[in-house]
Image: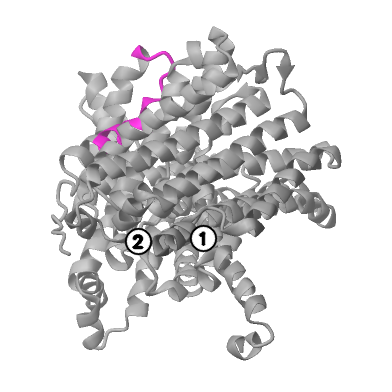
């Protein structure tokens, strides 16, 4: 029982980070109608940035997160301005290919700057152990839980109560109406990439603290897609719930089933198995809109 | 008579000129190993394998519009079927190769099943899932496939003739590349290919016109993955070694990029894309050490990162400046020379 609870709680913390990354993915999907393959690479970049600020520059956690957010925001603006704005009006597959190209470039830059090596910053973060009954949560996942929970709350407040947030939601709903109301769509697109980049890099810092950073960390982005699908690709709230569900399921499944398998590694594919089941039985996810197709 | 002309218009080779060109190309392909170094032959062999693979993706994505990011996963299925059959059971290569194609095709059918219910992003995700599940299964079945340790694969042979030199393997691969091209082109221009195009352009309209979506989408997955399986088998037999590291996820992305750069939905475009990007890769590999020499401080990582960055930049440039691919450029150049000397006013 303690084992199960332990798995559930660490899974919950992991799931919160998945949710954070998946939100970035959902925001791009809602606003630009494109599938952002590079989301995982934002995460990987975030991990390396975290290593740079925390270990090389020796900044405290809050300052590192602030610096990373700044870098992420600049990166988001640059990416939107130079690579995605020329593609406005092109079919979605072009935008998907562009994010693929971006992911390749980001991976190349990360290899160039950090050598593509395994970096870890275990023990640099402040220690914060929580005890819930008989189970204890290790320090890194609980920091991850707190930071991502704060980030999610800020995002939700922004989305529901600020002018810009409302404009973003309206753009996702109907671009032409929004433009006729005098809202500049390019500002909204730019902002959506900034948010996607920022939540990606913040998730990257937190994940990097748990598992270390290496270029394959980018595959976490693919897991975030499965989370977004489970929640329904156009629902931010769904992404949060699905992230937590996926984190717990993955952790529990690999905790119990990995010893039974000859080579383990179930955590790597489990989200995809869940996703296939979701795709077959409920393709619009838990909270997504049912789309009606018309000729 | 009119029917006859129309029929002739659809012919693969329009008139004697095309036949002559075809045989000149064939002749060049089969004579060139005598003049080229092993290094160049290796590059050409890899180009040939990519062409086979990209043709499959072109039928599935370019013609039928079902974007697949699991192509390398299906290549891995074919590769491991052929590798296990030849290495562990002693099945001859030329029996194992069709089986590899079939096996990959069946895997494609299984993961193509959701394609009737879902499309677009959802379908892309299910093919991504296919990739990771295939690779995971290969690692799990360690006792059969060798998993992450790899598996030694024998070189193909017919009777006493072993394809063990670069030149011999080049002959094998180029034969398959030509066969693959002809078959892909014929599928593309026939009834099936036109059904694929109709589905790509508007699936519901296609269904209203009497195209059985279920059957044709699955056919597209099957054919596309048969190609992938054959290409995967050719790849591992070339290296004489099969390992999961030969099938990274990013390569699927790269095959899709070949399609975009070459021009989707055209056999010639697929070939152009494969040739263009593979040669570019080779150029980067050659240029890497040169640049590394100029910046010795970052020499080690430079070569690895350069190819990633250049790959990405090439796609960016193509998407922004030439979204219709190299094929479109090529057609423009042809039109220019056809209309010469009157082409000048048109282009300016």
- Rendered image coloring scheme: one colour
From which residue to which does the magenta span run?
Answer: A260-276
- Which residue corresponds to mark 2? A34
As helix, strand or loop, the secondary structure at mark 1 comes to loop
- Label 2 Cα crowd, 10 Å radius (few <14 / some 14-19 / many 20+): many
Residue B9 percent across, percent down from the top left: 48, 61
What's the chain of the residue with tag 1? B
As helix, strand or loop, the secondary structure at mark 2 comes to loop
Residue B88 in view: yes
Most common SS among magenta residues: helix
What's the chain of the residue with tag 2? A
- Which residue corresponds to mark 1? B263
Mark 2 vs mark 1: give the one in front: 1
A103 left or right of B155 in image? left
Residue A255 percent across, percent down from the top left: 32, 22
Seen at 26% across and 76% down, the residue is A164
B293 left or right of A157 in image? right
- Label 1 Cα crowd, 10 Å radius (few <14 / some 14-19 / many 20+): many
Seen at 68% across and 54% down, the residue is B21
Residue A43 percent across, percent down from the top left: 45, 50
Indicate whether residue A191 is drawn in magenta: no
Q: Nearer the viewer, residue A116 or B345?
A: B345
Count of all numbered marks drawn on residues in the image? 2
Quarter containing the N terminus of chain B: bottom left
């Amino acid at each position: 029982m303690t084992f199960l609870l332990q798995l559930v709680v660490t899974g919950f913390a992991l799931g919160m980070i998945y949710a954070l990354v998946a939100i970035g993915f959902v925001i791009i999907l809602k606003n630009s109608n494109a599938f952002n393959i590079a989301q995982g690479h934002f995460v990987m970049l975030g991990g390396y940035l975290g290593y740079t600020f925390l270990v090389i520059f020796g900044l405290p956690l809050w300052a590192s997160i602030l610096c990373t957010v700044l870098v992420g925001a600049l990166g988001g603006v640059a990416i939107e301005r130079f690579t995605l704005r020329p593609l406005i009006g092109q079919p979605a597959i072009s935008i998907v290919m562009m994010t693929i190209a971006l992911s390749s470039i980001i991976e190349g830059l990360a290899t160039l700057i950090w050598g593509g090596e395994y970096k870890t910053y275990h023990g640099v973060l402040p220690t914060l152990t929580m005890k819930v009954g008989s189970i204890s949560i290790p320090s890194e996942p609980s920091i991850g839980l707190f930071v991502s929970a704060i980030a999610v709350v800020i995002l939700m407040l922004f989305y529901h109560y600020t002018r810009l947030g409302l404009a973003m939601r309206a753009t996702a709903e109907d671009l032409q109406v929004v433009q006729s109301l005098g809202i500049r769509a390019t500002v909204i697109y730019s902002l959506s990439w900034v948010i996607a980049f920022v939540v990606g890099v913040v998730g990257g810092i937190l994940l990097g603290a748990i598992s270390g950073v290496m270029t394959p960390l980018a595959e976490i982005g693919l897991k975030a897609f499965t989370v977004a699908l489970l929640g329904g690709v156009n629902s931010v709230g769904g992404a949060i719930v699905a992230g937590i569900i996926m984190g717990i399921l993955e952790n529990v499944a690999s905790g119990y089933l990995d010893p039974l398998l000859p080579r383990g590694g179930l955590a790597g594919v489990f989200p995809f198995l869940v996703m296939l089941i979701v795709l077959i039985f409920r393709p619009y996810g838990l909270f997504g809109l049912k789309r009606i197709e018309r000729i | 008579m009119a029917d006859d002309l129309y029929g002739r218009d659809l012919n693969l080779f329009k008139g004697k000129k095309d036949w002559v060109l075809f045989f000149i190309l064939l002749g060049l392909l089969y004579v060139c190993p005598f003049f080229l170094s092993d290094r160049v032959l290796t590059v050409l062999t890899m180009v040939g394998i990519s062409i086979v693979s990209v043709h499959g993706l072109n039928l599935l994505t370019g013609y039928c519009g079902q974007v697949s990011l699991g192509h390398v996963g299906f290549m891995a299925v074919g590769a491991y079927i052929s590798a296990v059959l030849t290495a562990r059971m002693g099945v001859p290569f030329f029996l194992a190769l069709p089986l590899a194609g079939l096996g990959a095709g069946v895997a494609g059918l299984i993961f193509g099943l959701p394609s009737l219910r879902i499309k677009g992003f959802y379908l892309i995700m299910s093919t991504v899932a296919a990739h990771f599940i295939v690779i995971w299964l290969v690692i799990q079945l360690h006792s059969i496939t060798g998993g992450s340790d790899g598996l030694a694969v024998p070189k193909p042979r017919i009777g006493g003739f072993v394809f063990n030199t670069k030149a011999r393997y080049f002959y094998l691969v180029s034969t398959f590349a030509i066969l693959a091209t002809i078959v892909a082109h014929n599928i593309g221009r026939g009834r099936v290919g036109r059904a694929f195009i109709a589905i790509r352009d508007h699936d519901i309209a296609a269904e209203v016109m009497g195209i059985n979506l279920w059957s044709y989408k699955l056919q597209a997955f099957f054919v596309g993955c048969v190609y992938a399986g054959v290409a995967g088998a050719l790849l591992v037999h070339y290296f004489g070694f099969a390992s999961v590291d030969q099938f990274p996820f990013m390569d699927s992305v790269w095959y899709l990029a070949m399609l975009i750069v070459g021009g989707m939905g055209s056999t010639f475009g697929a070939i152009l894309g494969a040739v263009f990007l593979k040669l570019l890769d080779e150029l980067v590999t050659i240029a890497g050490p040169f640049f590394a020499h100029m910046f010795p401080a970052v020499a080690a990582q430079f070569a690895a990162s350069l190819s990633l960055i250049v790959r990405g930049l090439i796609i960016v440039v193509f998407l922004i400046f030439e979204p219709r691919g190299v094929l479109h450029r090529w057609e423009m150049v042809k039109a220019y020379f056809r209309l010469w000397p009157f082409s000048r006013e048109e282009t300016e």
